[in-house]
């Protein structure tokens, strides 16, 4: 009767931004650990974006006395299925400080 049963599963795209490379690395290793050994989750890393800030030590004089700071932002994009998303949902909710995760629902998988 039902020869061709097609199950539709949602596909999620996670955009991860963090100030620490360790957080991104641990998150990707956790995804590899949670996923099946046959199904590796592809992770695409993007270039590091950095912002540089210069502050004056003294507002009145000595412009040469400056402090230079830089903030590095590491980003990655991960595509996961519905079952994988349900597994990693507690980690997404309890993410470390300085890590931002945007979840986008893509089309359905057939």
Image (cartoon, rainbow, N blue to C red):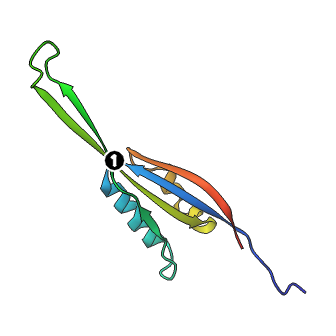
Quadrant of image for the N terminus:
bottom right
Please state the total of marks drawn on the protein image.
Answer: 1
Q: Residue furthest top?
A: 60
Horizontal and vertical percent for residue 50?
A: 31, 45
Quadrant of the rendered structure where residue 108 is? bottom right
Identity of the residue drawn at 22% across and 31% down: 54
Nearer to us in this view, 68 or 90? 68
Identity of the residue drawn at 64% across and 56% down: 105
Q: Residue furthest right?
A: 1
Residue 105 relative to residue 6: left or right: left
Quadrant of image for the C terminus:
bottom right
Identity of the residue drawn at 11% across and 14% down: 61
Judge whether 102 appears above or below 28 on screen.
Answer: above
Residue 80 relative to residue 37: left or right: right
Question: Which residue position is annotated with label 1?
Answer: 19
Judge whether 1 appears above or below 17 on screen.
Answer: below
Identity of the residue drawn at 17% across and 15% down: 59
Quadrant of the rendered structure where residue 64 is? top left
Horizontal and vertical percent for residue 7?
A: 75, 74
Horizontal and vertical percent for residue 29?
A: 38, 67
Helix, strand, or loop for circle 1?
A: loop
Within-10-Å neighbours for mark 1: few <14, some 14–19, many 20+: some
Horizontal and vertical percent for residue 83?
A: 61, 68
């Amino acid at each position: 009767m039902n020869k061709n049963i097609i199950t539709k599963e949602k596909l999620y795209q996670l955009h991860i931004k963090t100030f620490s490379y360790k957080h991104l690395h641990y998150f990707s290793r956790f995804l590899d650990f949670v996923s099946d050994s046959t199904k590796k989750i592809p992770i695409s890393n993007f270039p590091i974006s950095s912002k540089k800030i210069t502050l004056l030590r003294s507002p009145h004089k000595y412009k040469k006395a400056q402090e230079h700071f830089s903030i590095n932002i590491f980003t990655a994009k991960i595509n996961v299925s519905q079952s994988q998303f349900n597994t990693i949902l507690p980690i997404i909710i309890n993410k470390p400080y300085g890590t931002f995760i945007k979840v986008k629902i893509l089309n359905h998988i057939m």
